[in-house]
Image (cartoon, helix red, strand yellow):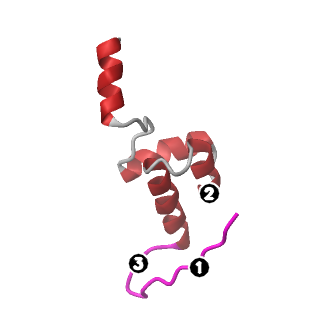
Amino acid sequence: MKTLQVNIPDNLDISNRELELLLASKLYEDGKLSLGQAAELAGLTKRTFAELLSQYNVSIFNFPADELSSDVKNA
């Protein structure tokens, strides 16, 4: 696993924990990490991470809109 050091401006009121959660959520949303990988990055269980995603306006159903439309038509 890679380690990253980030310099954050002093006036940005955000904790290291919040940054971890934001990063994990964004990487999951972008499809860079699976739910399990993102949960591990965040230090959470899959269930807890899945529940947390709504706080970041990220859907647990990480499907492209065109695939969803196709699935609905085929249902």
Name the residue tied to disc 3: 13
Rendered location of residue 31, percent (x, y): 48, 47
Q: Nearer the viewer, mark 2 or mark 3?
A: 2
Q: What residue is pinned by disc 2? A: 41
Q: Position of residue 22 (x, y in %)?
A: 46, 61
Placement of 37 over or under 73, stated as above or below: below
Closest to the observer, 27 or 73: 73
Q: Do the CB atoms of the residues marked 2 and 3 lie less than 8 Å apart?
A: no
Q: Earlier in the sequence, mark 2 or mark 3?
A: 3
As shown in the figure, which amino acid type bears the numbered disc 2? Answer: Leu
The amino acid type, in three-letter code, at marker 3 is Asp
Q: Residue furthest top?
A: 75
Residue beneath the point at 47% across and 54% down:
25
64 left or right, relative to 21: left
Is residue 29 rendered magenta in the image?
A: no
Residue stretch in magenta? 1-15
Task: Name the residue beneath numbered marker 1.
Answer: 5
Query: Residue at the location (62% across, 49% down)?
Result: 37
- Disc 1, SS: loop
Q: Quadrant of residue 45?
A: top right
